Amino acid sequence: MLDDPPKEHSPPNSLPVSFRMACDLKPGEIALGAIVGIFHQYASGDGDSKTLSKAEFDKLVKEQFPNLIPDECSSKLKKEIHKIAGDTIDFQEFMQLVSVLCTMSHCMLLESLGGK
Ligand SMILES: [Ca+2]
């Protein structure tokens, strides 16, 4: 059997344009582009792509983080975040949530490795 020819790499369309222009993105770059793309995708719902409204944020959490933030936790979390951030969440505030989620994921990884 012949080897399959190498597949041409094309970045996902959900990435911001500046990321899509690069042809050899590394996993870390794809992850960063995905975070930026997700924020922009959900923030653009009401015509103001710089901030997430409460409804946009709630939809993003439900659709993008259902395993890390299950429904039973999400309403309390969303209430607390809206209390801190107000009616809209900007990119910096969104990144604080992403940082917390990354830290949680890292802790879960360490736990699964027995603390190593
Ligand atoms: Ca918005």
Image: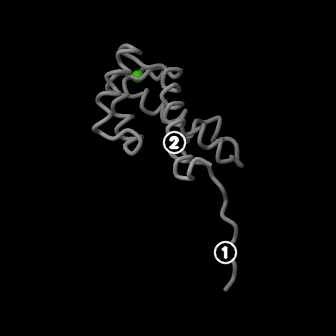
For badge 1, the amino acid type reads: Asp
Left/right placement of residue 110 relative to residue 70 reads: right
Q: In the image shown, does 47 or 51 lie closer to the viewer? A: 51
Residue 53, position in %: x, y? 36, 21
Residue 34, position in %: x, y? 55, 40
Q: What is the basis of the colouring in this image?
A: one colour
Hey, which quadrant is residue 88 in on the image?
top left
What kind of element bears circle 1?
A: loop
Task: Name above or below for residue 1 compared with residue 96.
Answer: below
Residue for point 31% across, 26% down: 55
Q: Which residue is mark 2?
A: 105
Residue for point 49% across, 38% down: 104
The answer to which of marks 1 and 2 sits earlier in the sequence is 1
Residue 101, position in %: x, y? 49, 35
Left/right placement of residue 82 relative to residue 92 reads: left
Residue for point 49% across, 21% down: 93
Tell which tag, 1 or 2, sits nearer the viewer: 2
Left/right placement of residue 115 relative to residue 52 reads: right
Residue 7, position in %: x, y? 66, 64
Q: Regarding ligand 1, which quadrant of the image does it lie in?
A: top left
Q: How many marks?
A: 2
Q: Looking at the rendering, in which quadrant would you find the N terminus? A: bottom right
